[in-house]
Image: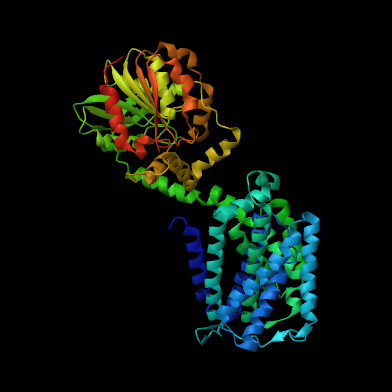
């Protein structure tokens, strides 16, 4: 739960701390309040435009409806503030519904004109009403009251608005993750495809208009009770255009973009208020720059900047700490010329050896849960870090499956064994296959966990920039590794697995994927006569049963077993199950 709402919690904490830094500057606190108010209105508009794909240039009208209703009810009829907030949202939502019905038949330019006409009409009607103060506006709008307590200070108003803002952003976050949010996005991408999928287009368009209007109404009510004065010109067409600019500058279909865009559009006028430069020029230049260089908005630009650059110092620190924790003099190594291969052992010290080879972005630690569980068996596990991984050295040679297999052969030869049992995972499965083809008489049995198939594994070209970004982005790398484990991680190894992955040869972040594309062993598999067991998780999106079938069918004594509710790494996700499968397989009489 905490992880799911981490960003929302950080957002709430930041809002709570912000005014404490400016306690003696009430003017700034008032500006912060306005930023939050307009971010609520922008959020409503973003739900309509950014998520549902419907255009609106009259959103200020909903703010006006909410503002005037709340002002009239509190000033003339002594309604409690909290009740008027709900009524303001509901009243604007009703008009959103009314506007939504004719909008169902309109798209693009025509919908934009219709919503703009609605916004202008609301402004003119309010201006013509003497009861509402006419064009002069309504003064003396009461301060908010909570359970008889009058909130008159700027700081008090700020925190009240802050609470409402967080609640509305949280509601929007949950809504957009729900079925309704998915329907919005489907309609935005293609109404035809959405309709073909059984989505009621009219229903969800109306919902988008209503929610957008409700947010606008609540924002308008908060504005009225914060400023204590409202006039029709406060909600003119210019405000609708500014709200549209806020979500375009900040980022369409982005919750954080609403806040970023609002900060720029609301705070900048105050920052440049003492210079003789028209705001229209500043906003115009800013919009042009954003559209040209950040077409998806500043929030997306900041997101990309964060993933590309802000993780680098943290990654450097984590790698340094990881290397400091490793005690080379207390660890086991095999030296092959200039190459040092690190390995760990576990299980029955006198048991039959089982060599374990890890996959890409991995290390021996992917077998750590297995090594711990081999103690009560007849087997001794030997898990190594392939050269270029973990705590092994990084040799200056071409990265290929053939070279990994030769280095694995040199490592195994140091144990002076006539027959071995071999386990390989993912990329390690391809390495084990190559080793087996080079040394078919040395293997007793081989078990492969979600291995790369014998005819290679092609990575789409557009994925390579992502693979390269893992070098300096621990968060992205951790996310990718967690996807391999799917749900369970009983040993809580993910943090350590991620730190180990960062130690990989920098070239290997992309070259391992290239290496998996360059081999083709299908025609050679007929020379394998020993038993081979293939394990594949039914939830593994990378390696599937269908992908492995051509490989399995070429090996005389091979079979495949599909593991239920398992991802790409049963050895981490369910080590007890894996040890049972491994020991049963090794104890089976040879066919």
Report the side of 178 relative to 108 (left or right).
left
Give the position of the N terminus as an image quadrant.
bottom left
Compared to 266, does 1 lie above or below? above
Please provide percent x and percent y for residue 37: 62, 72
Give the position of the C terminus as an image quadrant.
top left
Asked whether the viewer can see residue 28, the reply is no
Asked whether the viewer can see residue 174, the reply is yes
| Residue displayed at 55% across by 31% down | 459
Q: Nearer the viewer, residue 554 or 175?
A: 175
Q: Nearer the viewer, residue 508 or 419?
A: 419
| Residue displayed at 81% across by 62% down | 113
| Residue displayed at 30% across by 38% down | 369
Please provide percent x and percent y for residue 547: 50, 26
| Residue displayed at 58% across by 60% down | 256
Please provide percent x and percent y for residue 104: 74, 57
Please provide percent x and percent y for residue 471: 49, 41
Asked which colour scheme the image uses, the reply is: rainbow
Quarter of the rendering containing residue 116: bottom right
Q: Nearer the viewer, residue 202 or 347?
A: 202
Total tally of numbered discs in the picture: 0
Quarter of the rendering containing residue 224: bottom right
């Amino acid at each position: 739960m905490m992880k799911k709402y981490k960003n929302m919690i950080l957002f709430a904490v930041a809002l709570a701390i912000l005014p404490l830094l400016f306690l003696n500057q009430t003017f700034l606190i008032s500006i912060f309040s306005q930023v939050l108010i307009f971010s609520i209105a922008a959020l409503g508009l973003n739900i309509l435009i950014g998520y549902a794909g419907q255009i609106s240039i009259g959103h200020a009208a909903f703010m006006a409806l909410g503002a005037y209703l709340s002002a009239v009810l509190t000033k003339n009829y002594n309604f409690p503030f909290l009740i008027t907030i709900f009524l303001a949202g509901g009243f604007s939502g009703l008009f959103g519904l009314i506007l939504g019905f004719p909008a169902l038949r309109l798209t693009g330019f025509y919908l934009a004109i219709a919503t703009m006409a609605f916004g202008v009409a609301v402004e003119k009607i309010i201006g013509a009403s003497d009861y509402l103060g006419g064009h002069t506006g309504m003064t003396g709008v009461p301060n908010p009251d909570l359970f008889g307590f009058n909130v008159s200070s700027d700081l008090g108003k700020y925190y009240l608005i802050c609470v409402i803002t967080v609640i509305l952003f949280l509601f929007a976050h949950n809504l957009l993750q729900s079925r309704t949010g998915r329907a919005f996005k489907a309609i935005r991408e293609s109404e035809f495809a959405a309709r073909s999928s059984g989505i009621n287009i009219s229903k969800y368009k109306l919902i988008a208009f209503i929610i957008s209007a409700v947010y606008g109404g609540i924002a308008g009510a908060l504005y009225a009770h914060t400023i204590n004065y409202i006039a029709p010109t406060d909600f003119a067409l210019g405000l609708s255009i500014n709200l549209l600019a806020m979500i375009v500058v900040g980022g369409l279909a982005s919750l954080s973009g609403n806040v970023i865009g609002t900060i720029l559009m609301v705070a900048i006028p105050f920052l440049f208020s003492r210079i003789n430069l028209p705001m229209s020029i500043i906003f115009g230049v800013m919009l042009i720059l954003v559209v040209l260089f950040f077409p998806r908005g500043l929030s997306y630009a900041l997101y990309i900047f964060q993933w590309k650059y802000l993780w680098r110092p943290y990654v450097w620190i984590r790698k340094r700490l990881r290397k400091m924790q490793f005690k080379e003099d207390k660890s086991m190594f095999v030296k092959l010329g200039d190459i040092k291969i690190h390995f760990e052992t576990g299980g029955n010290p006198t048991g039959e050896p089982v060599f374990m080879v890890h996959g890409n972005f991995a290390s021996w630690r992917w077998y750590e849960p297995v090594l711990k569980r081999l103690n009560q068996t007849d087997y001794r596990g030997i898990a190594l870090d392939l050269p270029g991984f973990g705590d092994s050295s990084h040799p200056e040679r071409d990265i290929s499956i053939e070279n990994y297999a030769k280095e694995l052969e040199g490592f195994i030869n140091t144990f002076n064994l006539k027959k071995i049992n071999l386990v390989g995972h993912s990329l390690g499965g391809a390495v084990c296959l190559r080793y087996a083809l080079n040394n078919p008489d040395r293997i007793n049995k081989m078990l492969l966990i979600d291995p790369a198939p014998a005819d290679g594994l092609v990575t789409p070209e557009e994925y390579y920039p992502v693979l390269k970004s893992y070098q300096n982005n621990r968060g992205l790398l951790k996310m990718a590794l967690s996807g391999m484990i799917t749900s369970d991680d009983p040993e809580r190894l993910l943090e350590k697995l991620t730190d180990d992955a960062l130690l990989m040869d920098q070239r290997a972040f992309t070259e391992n994927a290239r290496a998996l594309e360059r081999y083709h062993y299908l025609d050679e598999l007929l020379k394998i006569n020993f038993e081979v067991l293939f394990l594949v998780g039914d939830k593994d999106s990378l390696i599937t049963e269908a992908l492995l079938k051509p490989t399995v069918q070429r090996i005389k004594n091979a079979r495949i077993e599909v593991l239920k509710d398992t991802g790409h790494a049963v050895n981490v996700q369910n080590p007890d199950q894996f040890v049972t499968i491994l020991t049963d397989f090794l104890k089976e009489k040879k066919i």
